[in-house]
Image (spheres, rainbow, N blue to C red):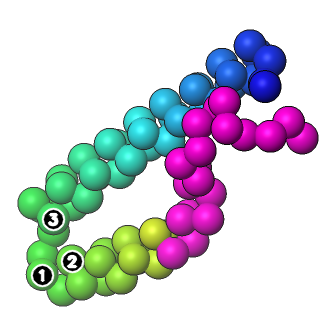
Amino acid sequence: MLSENAEYLYRVKIALQLSFIVWVMLVIFMFYATVEATTRIYGTFLLLFMVVIFTPFLPDGAGYEERKPQ
């Protein structure tokens, strides 16, 4: 079982990741609403590249009770 401090840090980490996802979605929507078609293609490739790079850093879905102490 993790300590109360570790549980708090885990929840903060998840909250920051969710907030980051929302902000990225807003930026993408604004980008697609204001930019020409050719640049959208490059932006889509950049987005896919970012997804491939950042996916390993997403949480594994295990709750903080299920995680083993390190």
User: Mark 2 highlights which residue?
Assistant: 40
SS for callout 2: helix
Compared with 4, 51 (above or below) is below
Q: Residue furthest right?
A: 70
User: Mark 1 highlights which residue?
Assistant: 37
Is 32 inside the magenta-drawn segment?
A: no
Compared with 27, 5 (above or below) is above
Residue at the spot 58% in from the left edge and 26% down from the top edge: 12
Binning the other alpha carbons within 10 Å of mark 2 as few (below 14), some (14 to 19) or many (20 upward) gives some
- In this rendered view, identify the residue nearer to me: 63 or 13: 63
User: Mark 3 highlights which residue?
Assistant: 32
Query: Amino acid under label 1?
Result: Ala
SS for callout 1: helix
Q: Position of residue 26 (x, y in %)?
A: 25, 47
Q: Position of residue 22 (x, y in %)?
A: 32, 42
- In this rendered view, identify the residue nearer to me: 69 or 47: 69
Residue at the spot 21% in from the left edge and 77% down from the top edge: 40
Place residue 29 in its image quadrant: bottom left
SS for callout 3: helix
Compared with 54, 46 (above or below) is below
Q: Say left or right for 9 vs 34.
A: right
Precedes in sequence: disc 3 or disc 2 = 3
Precedes in sequence: disc 1 or disc 3 = 3
Q: Position of residue 48 (x, y in %)?
A: 39, 77
The region drawn magenta spans 52-70
Place residue 43 in its image quadrant: bottom left
Rounded to the nearest angstrom, the CA distance separating label 1 from label 3 is: 9 Å
Rounded to the nearest angstrom, the CA distance separating label 2 from label 1 is: 5 Å
Q: Examine the rendering and report whether any part of residue 39 can be seen.
A: no
